[in-house]
Amino acid sequence: MVYYTDSPKINRRVVAGYYLFLCLVGFAVLLGPTGAGIPITIIGTDGRDQHELATPGSSMDPDDCATCHANEYNNWTGTAHATHMGSFSNATNDYITIGDHWEGTEAFFNSTCAECHVSGYNAIDDSYDALGVNCFACHDSTGSIDYNGTNCENCHEASGPTHPHQTGAYTNSAHANSLTDLRTSSHAGSSCMHCMSTEGFIHMDDDFDPAGAFNPIGCPACHSVHSDWSEDGPGMIRAVNTTQLCAICHVGTHHDTYNIWYGGSHHLAGVECIDCHGFDYAVAGDNTTYFLNHTFDVKPDLACGQSDECHLGMEEWALNQLEMKQDAFVALAEEIVEEAEALLAIVEAYNATDGADHELVAEIVEIIEDVEAIVHLQENDKSDGFHDSAGMMEILNEAYAELLEAKAYFYENTPAETVTVTETVTVTETVTVGGTLFGFDPNLVLMGGAVGGIVIGLILGILVGRRN
């Protein structure tokens, strides 16, 4: 420590400068990248110069995006957005092709189809920058995009049986109402947001407040032109296939739909989720267009007969089987719950008596809760036993057997006289609850009165005898 003194050997300005230097060093450490204060990210001059040169809006060529976004660009080049358009010319006209299902003159295409099949479309003169849907059809010049799927809706909207696009159907789906449903539930929390919001799903992050300004499960949640995982072609989904996509969310302790379906008869027969939940078609004259129904509501009368593998020609039999199995499942589930609630009431009443075996009670209550959880898990699957009718009924029967065994075990380990004791205690409590006699127990007052009467009678007898 340096002290100020009157000694001529100490220069006070030097000492003050020394302390000031230490303060500056400490402040630099606090705010610097190695300190524990505000973190600072050092950006190399090459990276900084490159982004300064890449001025947003300076080019509308998607090839320029590949400089920095090579992975996204390469994935996009393999999608239908990038590859579904073509053009050629002959001596008289320029022609446009859309996939392998349409061919027409450029003039007709420009006035009728271009709005959704090109990038940079200008409605004033039907001009455009490029065939196909490239980066700038979805992103603006700054590269930003919303999570609400508005850009998808601009083209993928319902427009009749020849173009049965699905944003109209989507608006009537549970996906479109995911946040509304969550916010009205009694258990809404951030832990639900990775499956109930687009932002949470894309980032697989639960750090979102359900009450915040987020978007429900929409087009960008399931589809991404930048993904390279899908084996399902033009769908551009965020998984290997559609069933794996559904499995990202439809699993867990509350709604384990995927694992219940997996291993069931329909899974073993190769029936995927969208084969039932998405199958639909539209008829226009002599043409039938099959498409994915984005409400995801099951239409069994259509789905059961869609191919030779799906009960074609036996739809009525299949629907009758479905109804029978679902009715049996619902009835058994309700019976188990009623039995569980009745047993729980008996066990709780016994637990309130004197001398009750609380360890036995805890054991039986745990079994009841486990059985009810099993039943509710099967019910929350929402298929009423259809996703795996044999497996789900087997699980319910096993749960019922466990419940009945617990009931028998409870009565075997509860003394027969317990009921008598319980009734006696109840009567005694009813009698004594009525009040006291001058603050004393009535039974003690009666006994005291009897003893007192005997003593007084003896005294009176002695006095009378002496007087005689």
Image (cartoon, rainbow, N blue to C red):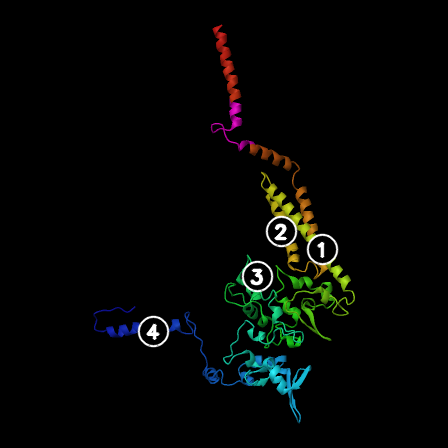
Q: How much space separates mark 2 and mark 3, taking CA atoms?
A: 26 Å
Q: Is residue 258 visible?
A: yes
Q: Which circle's residue, 1 or 4, is located before the other in the chain?
A: 4
Q: Which circle's residue, 4 or 3, is located before the other in the chain?
A: 4
The residue that label 1 is drawn on is 327
Q: Nearer the viewer, residue 232 or 15?
A: 232
* 10 Å crowding of disc 4: few (<14), some (14-19), many (20+): few
The residue that label 4 is drawn on is 24
Q: Is residue 136 magenta?
A: no
**Quadrant location of residue 306?**
bottom right
Q: Nearer the viewer, residue 312 or 352?
A: 312
Q: Helix or strand or loop: what does disc 4 sit on?
A: helix
Contact between labelled residues 1 and 2, with CB atoms less than 8 Å apart = no
Foreground mark, 4 or 2? Answer: 2
Foreground mark, 2 or 3? Answer: 3
* 10 Å crowding of disc 1: few (<14), some (14-19), many (20+): few
Is residue 174 depicted above or below 226 in this figure?
above
Which residue is rendered at x = 55% and y = 59% of the image?
Answer: 184
Q: Residue furthest right?
A: 313
Q: Which amino acid lies under the numbered mark 2 shown in the image of this protein?
A: Glu
How far across and down, in percent of the image, does residue 266 sit? 72, 65
Contact between labelled residues 4 and 1, with CB atoms less than 8 Å apart = no
Q: Residue furthest front?
A: 285
Q: Residue furthest top?
A: 468
How far across and down, in percent of the image, does residue 96 sit? 64, 86
Q: Which amino acid lies under the numbered mark 3 shown in the image of this protein?
A: Asp
The residue that label 3 is drawn on is 181
Q: Which amino acid lies under the numbered mark 1 shown in the image of this protein?
A: Asp
Foreground mark, 4 or 3? Answer: 3
Is residue 46 depicted above or below 417 in this figure?
below
